[in-house]
Image: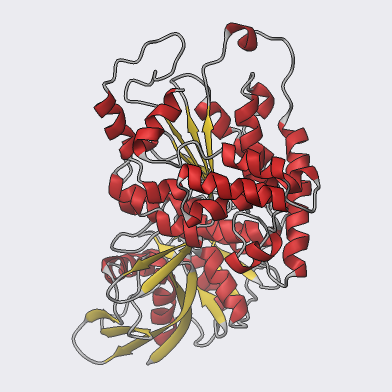
């Protein structure tokens, strides 16, 4: 007898519908799974056998063939365990055939018949709603995650035995009750920009970066506060909208990084990979393409501490994501696209010993060592960093000053107002570009018109600093953000002058050494 159960798999971030066709026919006992299954899917044979027996059902000693259609799409992971087991029970008459018609079923089975969680439940739920299915059957541990999708009935199951009994009795499946507490907002981690003493120049640069979604490079000696500043950048970013939160949650769901409760991610991500991270770990990839750190930081912050210590190939691979806001992982059977629209915040010492230009400690590095150290960060990558910020060592008076620093909440209010101006400008141009750092080039040229004095100053700076066309474009975008923070419609000379001041490393390598050491 033939039975069909609808299921799904995840390719990249998108769900693909899969029909699980189970035929139990005459012949010697065997169990075959076809339809481009990977090793985890092929191993479902042993899990399904044990789960059916331990759930109190009979495993037929006949020829069992399972086809996962469409056959030309690669099937990965253990999410097909539950639909395969239900197909066998339906084909042998142990549960009513067609009882789950119109439902998408996913779930991994343990040997005792319990249903374990799977990755990508949110993407599958979004696909089920798009395909206009009656509902989705998921493990209990994935129910809160799938319930993020509105207008889709969610049915949570704890075990194959409980689901089989409900189907055999023709009882309606238990609906998962959506709870307001599931869509909670995580805390800010207890950090605040008010914790930072002094460093007014760096604080100003972070405010500009947050307002326009610009990339930042922090340069300074050890202990000057670079990491402390970077970790507080997320506290001045605007909150995620619900659509953005779902987009971020999908990435974490596919990567298997959601919390056990599976709640909606409502705070902007902050990712800080170690400098030993490989290229696939940083940008994504692997035999089964998975999102990397740059995608896990989507709509948030990617912090690279000790930037020159990262592998050169990994840093160069960041150039496309920083420019296009996405990562394309190409494989022989398919090309997968992961979103990667994040802010890059990097930190580095000015030289190998870290004390070039320090007023207290003498630098012990020879000039060739300094050149080699700075050359580890390529010019094309620096071109994509909008703000080069020096973070000097603080004097004792600044560290011990009782004067309070401005809080994250106060800075975030200005950032939100500047982002609102950018959103209104984008809406007026008929685009969804919300920040100066990510708006299309054509829109940037229409919106970022300089006053004559500002234009003349920038022409002189281009010749003096040998700026590339990309660096010129970045300076204009930063100047537009500075004007937005002030509530100004026109880009004036002070805005451009401040933006040019953040390009201290945008010159030949020999000049970079001198600039950092000043």
Q: Nearer the viewer, residue 177 or 39?
A: 39
Does residue 223 appear left or right of residue 239 in this picture? Answer: left
Residue at figure coordinates x 55%, y 34% from the top left = 230
Residue 181 in view: no
Residue at figure coordinates x 40%, y 10% from the top left = 361
Residue at figure coordinates x 40%, y 27% from the top left = 514
The quadrant the N terminus occupies is bottom left
Residue at figure coordinates x 46%, y 11% from the top left = 359
Residue 174 sits in quarter: bottom right
Q: Nearer the viewer, residue 375 or 63?
A: 375
Q: Residue 143: horizontal and vertical position, in percent? A: 59, 60
Residue 220 in view: yes
Q: Residue 219: horizontal and vertical position, in percent? A: 47, 30
Q: Residue 202: horizontal and vertical position, in percent? A: 60, 30
Q: Is 148 drawn above or below residue 394 in the view shown?
A: below
Count of residue discs: 0
Q: Is 162 drawn above or below residue 450 in the view shown?
A: below
Q: Residue 109: horizontal and vertical position, in percent? A: 40, 63
């Amino acid at each position: 007898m033939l039975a069909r159960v609808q299921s799904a798999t995840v390719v990249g971030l998108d769900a693909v519908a899969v029909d699980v066709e189970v035929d139990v026919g005459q012949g010697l006992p065997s169990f075959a799974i076809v339809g481009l299954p990977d090793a985890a899917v092929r191993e479902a044979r042993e899990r399904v056998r044990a789960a059916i027996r331990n759930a109190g059902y009979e495993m037929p000693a006949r020829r069992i063939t399972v086809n996962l259609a469409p056959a030309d799409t690669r099937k990965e992971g253990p999410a097909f365990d539950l639909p395969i087991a239900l197909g066998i029970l339906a084909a042998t008459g142990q549960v009513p055939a067609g009882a789950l018609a119109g439902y998408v079923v996913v779930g991994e089975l343990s040997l005792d018949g319990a249903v374990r969680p799977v990755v990508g439940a949110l993407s599958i739920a979004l696909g089920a709603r798009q395909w206009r299915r009656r509902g989705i059957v998921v493990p209990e541990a994935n129910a809160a995650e799938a319930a993020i999708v509105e207008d889709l009935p969610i049915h949570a199951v704890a075990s194959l035995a409980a689901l089989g009994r409900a189907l055999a009795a023709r009882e309606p499946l238990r609906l998962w009750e959506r709870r307001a507490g599931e869509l909670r907002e995580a805390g800010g981690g207890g950090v605040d920009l008010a914790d930072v003493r002094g460093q007014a120049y760096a604080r100003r640069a972070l405010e500009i970066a947050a307002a326009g979604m610009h990339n930042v490079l922090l340069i300074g000696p050890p202990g000057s506060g670079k990491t402390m500043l970077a970790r507080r950048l997320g506290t001045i970013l605007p909150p995620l909208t619900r659509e953005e939160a779902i987009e971020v949650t999908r990435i974490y769901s596919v990567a298997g990084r959601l919390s056990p409760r599976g709640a909606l991610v409502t705070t902007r991500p902050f990712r800080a990979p170690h400098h030993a991270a490989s290229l696939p770990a940083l940008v994504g990839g692997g035999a089964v393409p998975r999102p990397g750190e740059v995608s896990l930081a989507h709509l948030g912050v990617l912090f690279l501490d000790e930037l020159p210590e990262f592998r050169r190939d990994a840093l160069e691979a960041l150039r496309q994501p920083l420019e296009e806001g996405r990562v394309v992982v190409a494989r022989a059977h398919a090309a997968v696209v992961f979103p990667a629209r994040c802010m890059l915040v990097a930190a580095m010492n000015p030289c190998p010993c870290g004390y070039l230009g320090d007023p207290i400690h003498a630098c012990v590095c020879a000039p060739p060592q300094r050149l080699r150290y700075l050359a580890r960060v390529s010019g094309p990558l620096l071109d994509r960093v909008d703000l080069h910020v020096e973070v000097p060592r603080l004097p004792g008076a600044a560290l011990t000053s009782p004067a309070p620093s401005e809080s994250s909440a106060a800075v975030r209010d200005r950032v939100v107002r500047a982002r609102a101006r950018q959103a209104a400008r984008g809406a007026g141009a008929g685009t969804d570009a919300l920040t100066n750092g990510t708006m299309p080039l054509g829109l940037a040229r229409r919106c970022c018109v300089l006053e004559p004095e500002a234009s003349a100053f920038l022409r002189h700076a281009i010749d003096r600093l040998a700026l590339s066309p990309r660096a010129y474009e970045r300076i204009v975008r930063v100047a537009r953000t500075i004007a937005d923070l002030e509530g100004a419609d026109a880009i004036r000379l002070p805005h451009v002058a401040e933006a040019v001041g953040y390009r201290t490393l945008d010159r030949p390598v020999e000049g970079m050494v001198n600039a950092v050491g000043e």
